[in-house]
Amino acid sequence: DAKTTQPTSMDCAEGRAANLPCNHSTISGNEYVYWYRQIHSQGPQYIIHGLKNNETNEMASLIITEDRKSSTLILPHATLRDTAVYYCIVGLGANNLFFGTGTRLTVIP
Amino acid sequence: EAGVTQFPSHSVIEKGQTVTLRCDPISGHDNLYWYRRVMGKEIKFLLHFVKESKQDESGMPNNRFLAERTGGTYSTLKVQPAELEDSGVYFCASSQEWIAERNEQFFGPGTRLTVL
């Protein structure tokens, strides 16, 4: 079922930008890229999603390559509260989300 | 606005017993999803309701699991009889739209189920 590849873990210094990569080389033309995160012991939290264009909201920015085979989630100024597991999910989104193993981001003081 | 709520937050039962988990979605959300994470594994989809109808139940592991959403509001997930491998965290999510470009799913805090 895995359609995405993410690094297992990453560290980021507090206040710096966190750039989380995701490869999705088999993405089809109508599939979206979604990012969710799970902070310890909480339910997953939606962050952002996109189809072709780069997207930005109050939480993060999503950069999607022109061929759509990879993307990067950017947290512009990481805080300690951003420590979480980040999931890059590809799909039509209307149905189920396939979470995979995600990237464990640790923000270091 | 209240988020997705789940009850109970924690349940400890013995193998062979029955447990019913409840999910209250965000008011007005027609779409309701159940997911679970069993020990050491990834979060897995169980099923999806649109109002009171089961849109997709392809993730339900076996017939010991029964999900209902009578009236299209809250949903229950019953496990009968519970087995040891059912232990894990059960998440519920809801969304307003059923179109990909606006399908932000809001998750509840989960119910931690322990089967002894």
Image: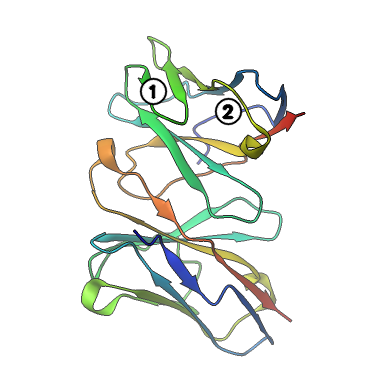
Would you place residue A75 above or below residue B94 in this image? above
Q: Residue at x 42, y 71 (%)?
A: B23
**Lateral position of residue A82 relative to residue A69, left or right:** right
**Lateral position of residue A33 relative to residue A81, left or right:** left
Would you place residue B70 above or below residue B59 in this image? below
* Rendered location of residue A26, percent (x, y): 44, 24
Q: Please state, as top left, top right, bottom left or bottom right, where the C terminus of chain B lies in the image.
A: bottom right
* Rendered location of residue A109, percent (x, y): 77, 28
| Residue under numbered circle 1 | A56
**Lateral position of residue A107 relative to residue B17, left or right:** right
- Three-letter amino acid code of the residue under disc 2: Thr
Q: Chain of mark 2?
A: A
Would you place residue A99 above or below residue B21 in this image? above
Q: Residue at x 64, y 39 (%)?
A: A81
Q: Does residue A101 appear in this view?
A: yes
Disc 2 secondary structure class: loop
Q: Does residue A33 appear in this view?
A: no
Give the quarter of the image for residue B5.
Answer: bottom left
* Rendered location of residue B32, percent (x, y): 34, 61
| Residue under numbered circle 2 | A5
In front: A53, or B39? A53
The residue most toward the top is A66
Give the quarter of the image for residue B53.
Answer: bottom left
The residue most toward the bottom is B17
Q: Residue at x 68, y 35 (%)?
A: A80
**Is disc 2 surrounded by few (<14), some (14 to 19) or many (20+) residues within 10 Å?**
some
Q: Chain of mark 1?
A: A
Tell me whether marks 1 and 2 sit on the same chain: yes
